[in-house]
Structures are given as structure tokens and as C-alpha cells.
Image (spheres, rainbow, N blue to C red):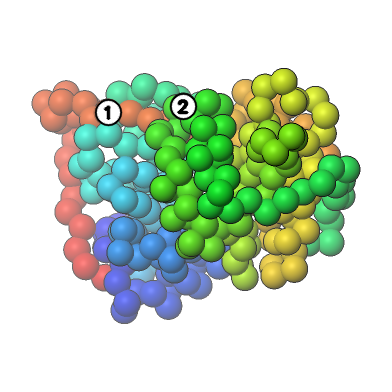
Amino acid sequence: MKCVLLNSSGEPAFWEHVRRDTPNYYFFIFDWRLNKDKTKIFLALLDREIVGSMLIYDQRIVHIRGSPEAAELLMNEVDLEKVEFQAPKEHEPIILQKYRPSTKQEMILMTLQGGEEQLCIKHPIVKLGSAEAEEIAALLGEEFPEWGEFTSDRIIERMREGVLFLGIKERGKVVSMSNTRILDFGSNIGMVVTMKGYRGRGYATSVVSALLKEIFRESKLALIHVLSDNPSAMRVYTKVGFKPYKTYAFIRGERIAEKIVEERKDQASPCGDH
């Protein structure tokens, strides 16, 4: 088995591989198509067959797929100090050989095929723009502080990139919202949030339903990710038709001192270019 860095000559085999399971490789497809300047993809090859792959986005997010043997090989190429991992659960021990977790959770990917949705829009939905960017950032920052800093400038930047933000307003204030970037191969719904004091009214169901309505104008696949310890969110997504597709280990961690890593691993193999 060998590890190669994806480039243009390896793209035909890469695209054939990931398109066999678009939901599982969604972020590989998304980032290689739209964020190539911030993305590296490594492939584990066995007799020219792809048996594993790893996405490194923006020097901070790592996704690993494939066999445990491939994951071991691919992990040799991760030398970041702080990382956010998403990988099959059986890869968790391999990751923890090299990284000390600050967060370790179970993340469920849910999918929905166009035609199977059960939309429920019972509240007025509005498209949110730059005028609401500050409110959106504050709402996300209050609900999801562990996901980093949210700023109005970054929200506006995402809107300019084509991300659609939909929400519900009460007395002129954004009280529920979510977003997606609508793409032909499928669209991932982002963080769904409803302000405290406005929950239990079905707002999240209406917002997600409105996003699905827009998604299925362009493609046949919608995705959403949810932590397994968030049953209320899962109920909302199940209500509109989403079904669990795969479960991953979600790990945030810091690199363990090299000496300790060497004690845990036998050897490392370098990656070449593909």
C-alpha cells in the first residue's frame, strides 16, 4: 500500500471513487470543487485501487475514509498541532495514537432524497441578508461557541459565496435560522438554531423544510449532520424525512509530543505525488 497526494493526473480515478458514495465523500467533493486552494487530498492505493482517502482543509479540518490499514498510513501525513477530525468510528484508536482529544463525540450523517421529503412550513420564512448578518453571528455564537468565532463579516462573505440563509423573524428580530449552499450534486444544511424562548414552536421544522424546498429545485440529495447527543434536533430532521446514513467519530484534539507518538507507532511512510 502507498500514499499519494492527489493532483490533476489522479482526478479521474478520484472522481470515479467518490461518486460511488456521494454522502460519505460529500466534503471531499465540495472542497476539491470549490475550495481547492485550501484543500489537500491524500489517497491510499493498493495495486492502483483506492482503499482510503484523507481530506485536509484549511490546515485545521481532517476527514478520513477507508480501511483501518489505510487510515494508519494516511495519519502519517497529519502534522498539525490542533485538528478537527471526522472519521469512521473504527478509526478512533488510530487518531488517538497521535492526538489528545479535547472533544470526542459521535456525529450522525442524515440524508434525504428528493421526492421523499415531508415538508412542514407553518411559519413565514424570510431570506436573510447582510442587514441581518450581525444577528446571525450573535445567534450562532451564543448557541455554538465550541464551533469557533462567528463574525458578521464572515457571514456576509459566505452570502457572497452563494450560501443561502433562511430564517424566521419576530418583531423584526431573527429568532430561528439555518443555511445551505445549493449545489447540483447535493446540499448540506448547516447549523440550525432557534433562540431560547422561541423553541418548541416548530420554527426549526419550518426553516429546514424551506431550505429543502430550495435544495430540491436543483438536486436530488440533501444532507445534514447532527451530534448523537442532540435528540431534539434528530426529531426535527426525521420529521421532514431525513434518515441516518452513517455514524462518524468527531474528535477535536492536540498533537501528542513526538516522543510519545513514536512509542505508540512502529514507523511512518512518506507520501509521494500522484
| Residue 225 visible, this angle | no
Three-letter amino acid code of the residue under disc 1: Glu
Q: Position of residue 264 (x, y in %)?
A: 22, 27
In the depicted structure, whether residue 272 falls above or below residue 178: below
Three-letter amino acid code of the residue under disc 2: Pro
In the depicted structure, whether residue 228 falls above or below residue 14: above
Residue at the (23%, 48%) spot, across then down:
77
Q: Residues within 10 Å of mark 1 (few under 14, many from 20)?
A: some
Residue at the (51%, 32%) spot, across then down:
138
Residue 254: which numbered mark, if any?
Answer: 1
Q: Residues within 10 Å of mark 2 (few under 14, many from 20)?
A: few
Say which label, 1 or 2, has the lower sequence index. Answer: 2
Q: Position of residue 199 (x, y in %)?
A: 75, 25
Residue at the (17%, 54%) spot, across then down:
270
Residue 85: which numbered mark, if any?
Answer: none
Q: Position of residue 110 (x, y in %)?
A: 67, 45
For the N terminus, give its image quadrant.
Answer: bottom left
Front tag of 1 and 2: 2
- Say which element carries label 2: helix
For the C terminus, give its image quadrant.
Answer: bottom left
- Say which element carries label 1: strand
Residue at the limit of the structure toward the front, as seen here: 171
Which residue was labeled with disc 2?
145
Work out whether residue 197 or residue 64 is closer to the camera in this orientation and state it: 197
| Residue 274 visible, this angle | yes
Work out whether residue 271 or residue 105 is closer to the camera in this orientation and state it: 105
Q: Is residue 194 left or right of residue 125?
A: left
Label 1 to label 2, Cα distance in Å? 19 Å
